[in-house]
Amino acid sequence: MSNLVSNTGQPPVKGLLGGKAAPPKAPRKTDIVSRRNRPLARLWRIFKAVIPWVLIIGLVIWMFSDPAVLSLVLLVVSYAARIVFALFYAVIQFVAIFWFMARSKTEIIKPEDPKTMTFADYWGQPTLLRLVKQWISLLSDRDKFVEMGGKYINGILLYGPPGTGKTMLAKAMAGEAGIPFMSIEGSGFRGMFVGVDVLKMMAFCGKAKKLAREYGACIAYIDEIDAVGASRSGVMGGAGGGMGGMGGGMFGGGSGALTRLLYEMDGIDEKGRVEKWKGRIYKMLGKTPPVRNWHVLYMGSTNRPDVLDAALLRPGRFDQKIQVNIPDKSGRREVIKGYLSRVRYDETVDVEAIVEDTPSATPAEIASALTKDAVRIALFNGRHAISQRDIDQALQEQQVGLEQPIEEFDPEQRRQVAYHEAGHAVVQHYLLPEQRIVRVSIIRRGNALGYVMHVDRTETYAAPLRRYAAHIMVSMAGHVATKLHMGEYWTGAAGGPGSDFSQVRGRIWQLYQSGYFGPPVRGMESTGSAALPPGADGLIERFWKTLEEQTEQLLVEHADEVDAIAQALLEKSELSNPEVMELMGDNGYQPNQPKQMGRWAPARLTGAPRRLPAPIIAGSRPSTPVSDTSPNPAIKLKPDAVPSADLLKPLAEAAAPTVESTQPRPAIQLRRPSSSSPTGPLTSPAKPADQPASNDEPSDKAQ
């Protein structure tokens, strides 16, 4: 059998049963091109293209041949023109309204502006400046960075407490790099209608890109970015949250601006329409399109980084997250010197005193005190330069408010306030020698009838728990001093947040959370509220009474100093640090000696809770330490005077409080030394509990 070859050039394929297979069928033209090239399809396309023109020409011929048809067509055209004009006018109005509402107030600082800032104007954060200088140097000269294959960051997030200089740092970065700085508030993206926030974000990013093309780079800064970048999971701007939800209706807010910001930060390297047209032209000319030589650095600041959306914080958007903290002591010194260089001051200004009086102060607070309040006080006192007293007065106004003296203050009430503040000052002096008393006053400021202002002599970042107990005794001192010197308790310690008893309760909660009373098994994360464990009231009550008894013992021992400070306050109304120290004894503070904290530490750690100090009998003279956990080693007790009580026993097993510990007591009557006796400290003799207070001396004898 001869070999047959098909017209395709391939040998025929045999069937399954050995016979000849059918010849292959020609491929059917089922693709789109073949369908469009069919004769009927071509005729249909020609007909659709010609028929409109045929109808128009026929209508025109008919119009000119019949006047009635012409008038009808003109009438229809006029109505159509009115409708089109009305629609066009409505669209123009709507666009104009949206354009007006989409305008937000933005601050633009160009390199040639006189208000440009540099790193020389940013003080107190040298470590932070060294970090940001690396990225800023790449903004102005990034050729080597790009040659190495590096990719510039898209965003930097600054977070920290208010007033630490986050916005000032962003401005200094732009000024140091010689590029424009454009900023807007986060709330500026809010809009009444849906879509307005997106338009505002598009306009903001468009301006930033325009400045970047002109100057090579630009910093687009969003202040308080949490107003627009909060989490979309139901927190501020999420679905159904607040005014922005409205079920997707006409009124808006929502997360449209955030979504657009995420898109802009992701598409920072995408080419715009102009760049695409330039690329096409270069491609037609056979040339390589130029590489983009400009960049937009997005920056944001917030004091609530925990509420920001997770998509905003991922790498590729805000790549760097920098915490701007409150400056330390050396940083505050630099900030104070910087702002003092901008004002006129006399020789009484002491920089170190200002540094010590402003612990935990932010640069904004320091700037306000030195350049606003102190200058105002000096000017209205007829001086042309600020003094140290003006600065002290400005710092007081910041911390406790403006002076609001009571013109007709009842003498007995004024005397009570004086003894109350004197008690605070004495216990503060002896229990916390590492803190310096700045001022004691009985002039009303804000809601406080008086106050004792104190500051740490050294920066404190960690402290022993006994210091919390000492603070509790300082808070109790005013209440106890009033009872000792006035004969009964007065109001003043109780009240709302910030009162003495409120501070005591807060410190006790801190002691519990720090493990002072045993394992802190309950907390905010487990209970949802700052609540002590059930059954702890007995322990807390005995601990409260223990410290109150120790406070009373200390005030009885230094009753002459309490009385001297109270009489000085009644005479002058306000005492400075030197004036207070003249009335105080030595508290053992030695600034040039290293602190020996090891002798107070327990010899070994055990699983059992430490025994707390027992109450001290008022009037007994201490001579030995109460226990290792005594808040102040100066308070001592003879070992055989009072047996040590275990405060961890159940409250039912503890001795019932006596009547004397809860009832008003006679006021302490100070025995003045006679003229023949040598000058010495005033004494406070012990009196029977039932002896009435002497009324020989009037209550307003100091007036």
Image: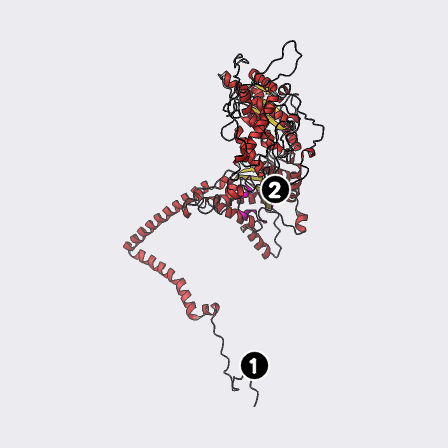
User: Looking at this view, is 571 or 145 the one in front?
Assistant: 571
User: Could you say which quadrant of the image residue 126 lies in?
Assistant: top right
Start-end of magenta stretch: 301-321
Residue for badge 1: 10
- On whether residue 333 falls in the magenta region, the answer is no
Q: Quadrant location of the C terminus?
A: top right
Question: In the rendered structure, does residue 314 fall within the stretch colored magenta?
Answer: yes
Seen from the viewer's position, the closer of residues 49 and 343 is 343
Image coordinates for residue 89, horizontal then vertical, percent = 39, 45
Q: CA–CA distance between discs 2 and 1?
A: 74 Å
**Which of the labelled discs sits on residue 163, or is there none?**
none
**503 lies above or below 245:** above
**Which is nearer the N-term, disc 2 or disc 1?**
1
Residue 504: where, in percent of width, then height? 55, 31
471 or 104, which lies in front?
471
Residue most extreme to the bottom? 1
Q: Amino acid at mark 1?
A: Gln
- Residue 483 to residue 504: above or below: above
Q: Amino acid at mark 2?
A: Ile
What is the count of numbered marks?
2
Most distant residue in the right direction: 593
Say which of marks 2 and 1 sits in front.
2
Q: Position of residue 78 (x, y in %)?
A: 33, 49
Image point 36% across, 46% down: which residue?
86
Q: Are marks 2 and 1 in contact (CB under 8 Å)?
A: no
User: For mark 2, what is the residue?
Assistant: 322
From what the image shows, is residue 268 above or below residue 461? below
Dot 1 falls on a residue whose secondary structure is loop
**Image quadrant where one finds the N terminus:** bottom right
Residue 201 rendering spot, x and y as whole percentages: 50, 44
Which residue reaches farthest top? 676
Residue count near mark 1 (Cα–Cα under 10 Å), binned few <14, some 14–19, many ≥20: few
